[in-house]
Amino acid sequence: MLKISIKDSQTRRLLVLEGKIIAPWTDELSKAACQDRRNHLAGRELVIDFREVTDISADGEEALYWLMVQGAKFRGGGVFIKQVLKQLAQRVRRNDSL
């Protein structure tokens, strides 16, 4: 299960994630972030907090990759989460250089 909490400020929208980023909840994360970016950000940055994430599947990595490409910022998380984000950032840089 994945719980998504939204905390707004004048400069950013924070999505606090709790649980596992796995299918079918990856679709919900993508929809929430996509809808937020179009309708509610109004120039604010989108930040995703991983402090309470316990697992990320391959589907979850793809959802996070898409969010990274769209300009989302990430914070928190343990060693596993940080390694996943590092690999995704390298993938984004490789694809940007093509």
Image (cartoon, helix red, strand yellow):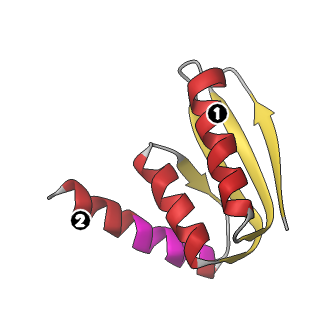
Task: Answer left or right for 42 relative to 97.
Answer: right
Name which residue type carries label 1: Gln
Q: Is residue 51 magenta?
A: no
Res 3 → quadrant: bottom right
Relative height, residue 74 to residue 23 (above, below)? above
Q: Residue at x 62, y 44 (%)?
A: 47
Q: Quadrant of the C terminus?
A: bottom left
- Front position in the image: 51 or 6: 6
Residue 66, percent from left and from top: 47, 54
Q: Residue at x 77, y 51 (%)?
A: 16
The span shown in magenta is 81-88
Res 26 → quadrant: bottom right
Q: Which mark is residue 35?
A: 1
Task: Answer left or right for 16 relative to 44.
Answer: right
Query: Which structural element holds mark 2?
Result: helix
- Front position in the image: 69 or 86: 69
Residue 46, percent from left and from top: 59, 38
| Labels 2 and 1: the sequence-earlier one | 1
Q: Quadrant of the N terminus?
A: bottom right
Q: Main secondary structure of the magenta part?
A: helix
Residue at the disc numbered 2: 94
Q: Mark 1: few, some, or many residues within 10 Å (few <14, many ≥20)?
A: few
